[in-house]
């Protein structure tokens, strides 16, 4: 069974940094592209970032470009999101999600809350 | 960026009703259109990919159609567990934008 578990969230002050992790199990992690998607409280879904299975291809939403860095460690079956210069508008539940057929997101983690506030 | 517009934003329906949600893309996305269901406090769940392909394990009362810019999600006979928010998402180009969501409520 596919399992994705996020960790590393919490409360951080504006301008601060946080690193999210996503531990993957139940599938061959090295064969799949991965994504981060977020959801602000009471709002809709926002795609944040994508990384290919090899890590060589990376994309970001304009709202996080230059501040967030996606990475992966295939030896550890883990996906990461380094978030710097955090803003109040980055407050959201962050999900890691597996890329599948036609770039759909077929498996999601349970989500981790990031709160940016002073 | 490709904009995704869902309608309606919310709807009220009864169990066993037929429900249709539409999604329009601001430019052609071929068939790179996915539908997700999200219940409160839970992660989204993939229902339909490639506009009309049913994800494994999803009940057959869910179906999708369309191509190009106009797409539809249909629930043939609404069940109590289907009351949730539904999102479309284009996966044709970066950024992979979502619609604003359609909340399906109990009448």
Image (cartoon, coloured by chain):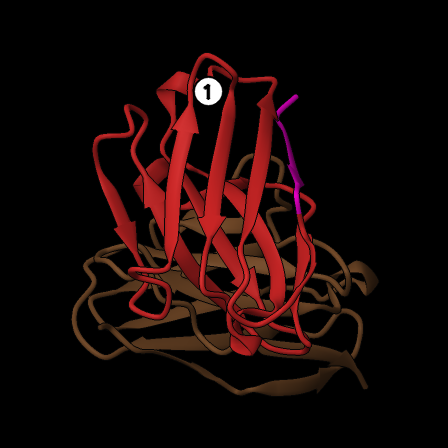
Query: Does residue B54 appear in this view?
Result: no
The magenta-colored residue range is A1-8
Q: Position of residue A29 (x, y in %)?
A: 46, 20
Q: Residue B66 vs residue A15: left or right?
A: left
Q: Quadrant of the C terminus of chain B?
A: bottom right
Magenta span: helix, strand or loop, mainly?
strand
- Residue A74 location, quadrant: top left
Q: Residue at x 30, y 61 (%)?
A: A65
- At a point 21% along the width and 63% down the height, the residue shown is B29
Q: Nearer the viewer, residue A88 or A53?
A: A88
Is A42 displayed left or right of B21 in the figure? right
Q: Is residue A52 above or below residue A54?
A: below
Tint applied to chain B in the drawing: brown
* Left or right of A13 in this view: B30: left
Chain A in the picture: what colour? red
Chain bearing tag 1 is: A
* Element at label 1: helix
Residue at (26, 43) in percent of width and height: A58
Residue B70 position, x and y percent, is: 29, 74
Residue A3 drawn in magenta: yes
The image shows residue B15 at horizontal and vertical percentages of 80, 71
Residue pointed to by mark 1: A29
Image height of B18 relative to A65, above or below: below
Q: Is residue B13 left or right of residue B36?
A: right
**Residue A64 or A13: which is nearer the viewer?**
A13
Nearest the camera: B60 or A16?
A: A16
Quarter of the image where the N terminus of chain B is located: bottom left
Please name the residue shown 55% across and 35% down the image.
Answer: B56
């Amino acid at each position: 069974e596919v399992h994705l578990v996020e960790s590393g969230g919490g409360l951080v002050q504006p301008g601060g940094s946080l690193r999210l992790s996503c531990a993957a199990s139940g599938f061959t992690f090295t064969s799949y592209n991965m994504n981060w998607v977020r959801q602000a409280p009471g709002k809709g879904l926002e795609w944040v970032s994508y990384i290919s299975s090899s890590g060589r291809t990376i994309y970001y939403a304009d709202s996080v470009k230059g501040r967030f860095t996606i990475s992966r460690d295939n030896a550890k079956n883990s996906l990461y999101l380094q978030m710097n210069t955090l803003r109040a508008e980055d407050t959201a539940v962050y999900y890691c999600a597996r890329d599948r057929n036609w770039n759909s997101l077929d498996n999601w983690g349970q989500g981790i809350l990031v709160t940016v506030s002073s | 960026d490709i904009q995704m517009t869902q309608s309606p934003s919310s709807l009220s329906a009864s169990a066993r009703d037929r429900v249709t949600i539409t999604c329009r893309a601001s430019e052609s996305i071929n068939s790179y259109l996915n539908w997700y269901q999200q219940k409160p406090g839970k992660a989204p769940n993939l229902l339909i990919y490639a506009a009309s392909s049913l994800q494994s394990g999803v009940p057959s009362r869910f179906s999708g159609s369309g191509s190009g810019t106009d797409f539809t999600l249909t629930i043939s006979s609404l069940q109590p567990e289907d009351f949730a928010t539904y999102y479309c998402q284009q996966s044709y180009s970066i950024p992979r934008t979502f619609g604003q969501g359609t909340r399906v409520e109990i009448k």
